[in-house]
Amino acid sequence: MRILSLVLLACGLVKAYPQWPNWNNNNWNNNNNNWNNNNNAVDNNWNNNNNNWNNNNNNNWNPQNQQGNNDWNNNNNWNNGNNNGQPQGQPQGQPPQQGQPQGPPEQGQPQGQPPQQGQPQGQPQGQPPQQGQPQGQPQGQPQGAPVDLSSISFKEAPGNYLEPCQQAGKIVKESYNGVNGGNSLNVYLPFGYEESKQYNIFYLMHGGGENENTIFSNDVKLQHILDHMIMSGELQPLIVVTPTFNKCEARTFYKEFRESVIPFVEGKYSTFAKSTSPDDIKASRMHRAYGGFSMGSASTWAVLVNCLDIVGYFMPLSGDNWEAEGGFGKAKSVADAVNKAGLKSNEYVIFCATGSEDIAYPNMNPQMDEMKKMPEFSGGNFHYLVAPGKTHWWGYVRHYIYDALPTFFH
């Protein structure tokens, strides 16, 4: 009788729940259908929601993992290529531990737990933007609007900005006659460059043991960052020039910059200078910037002190002013140059940055502290960014450029 009762009970369950064997799959499919339905809503707003997802996902996952994996590998080869234009600095941190994520998830792999009913999780689906169309909405300040430098904080470029861009600019290698004979530089032309248009121009100097090829190398990846910023609308199309001080000295390069580099580059490419006459170069100074890393930063301070009449924007990164001694002396030499040029606070901009663990921090910080006290640098035209925990490495410096460059040329 007990056996007969159990058989009857089992039959009753089968009759009551004929779909029991497929319960899990059906619910999963229902949830998945709900996900797809919800995802269609995401697809309809692809340009907004997907852009936000990519930005958040890349900001929060890729840059940290990139730093731990790809950038570690790049820096591991530092000693092999230092004298061949490789990035300056030592590899930071430890390589990823075995079993830790080392790159983005493979396409199509499940990520995390199955989605809860009605809750979209993971990457939005749908069609990507068509080739040639800007992705996402412009970020940062509207172009042409005044920017408060004090609002700049350290943030890394999205992880996909370190990869090739579908709207890539072009690098042109040029040779010219410098103060000490023949020299070379590279010119970045933005995607869609036209000679009939006028472009702002940014001269960016490498560090010690490097050369004019370092900044646009596959290790630094600055070209990719520029391409993505321009395509997304974060940055106006501009020309970027990477010269070298290797035929002279970092602190004396300003002479060659004034006498040879500007006339050569701006006589060939379309900038806001109507001609290469001294008067036209001076008249276009607020469309011209100069910056550099490490010894390139020392070069930047020298250009600031000696060339304020032809340059309006400055970006010294991880390097102090070698034109004077002591924190106050270094700051005063910059203030004296500003006063000698007779400039108002809205006629020059200085953005400085370094890391709290950077070897340049102990020398740079006293100068920055003194500059903050001076009226010449209290009009919103000066900002000093210290990135917590960051060291003397292009892997961090490229993000300083990403943070600051959109605030230039306003």
Image (tube, rainbow, N blue to C red):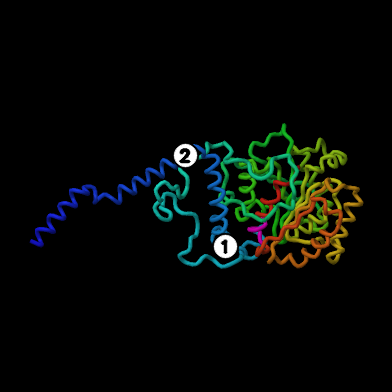
Quarter in which the N terminus is drawn: bottom left
Question: Image point 11% across, 58% down: which residue?
Answer: 5
- Which of disc 2 and disc 1 is earlier in sequence? 2
What are the residue bounds of the magenta stretch? Answer: 393-397
Task: Please give the name of the residue rendered at 81% of the width and 56% of the height, measured from the top-left corner.
Answer: 301
For disc 1, the marked residue is 72
Foreground residue, 364 or 249?
364
- In the image shown, does 350 or 321 lie closer to the viewer? 350
The amino acid type of the residue labelled 1 equals Trp
Q: Tell me the element at label 1.
A: helix
What is the x, y in percent for residue 328?
Answer: 86, 64
Q: Nearer the viewer, mark 1 or mark 2?
A: 2
Residue 279 horizontal/vertical position (percent) = 88, 39
* Residue sitting farthest toward the left: 1
User: How many discs mark residues in the rendered view?
Assistant: 2
Quadrant into which the C terminus falls = top right
In terms of image quadrants, where is residue 284? Answer: top right
Classify 179 as above or below 264: below
Is the magenta region chiefly helix, strand or loop? helix
Q: Mark 2 points at which residue?
A: 41
| Residue 337 locus on image (x, y percent) | 88, 54
The verdict on residue 395 being magenta is: yes
Q: Residues within 10 Å of mark 1 (few under 14, many from 20)?
A: many
How many residues crowd mark 2 within 10 Å: few (<14), some (14–19), many (20+)?
some
- Confirm whether the magenta stretch covers residue 380: no
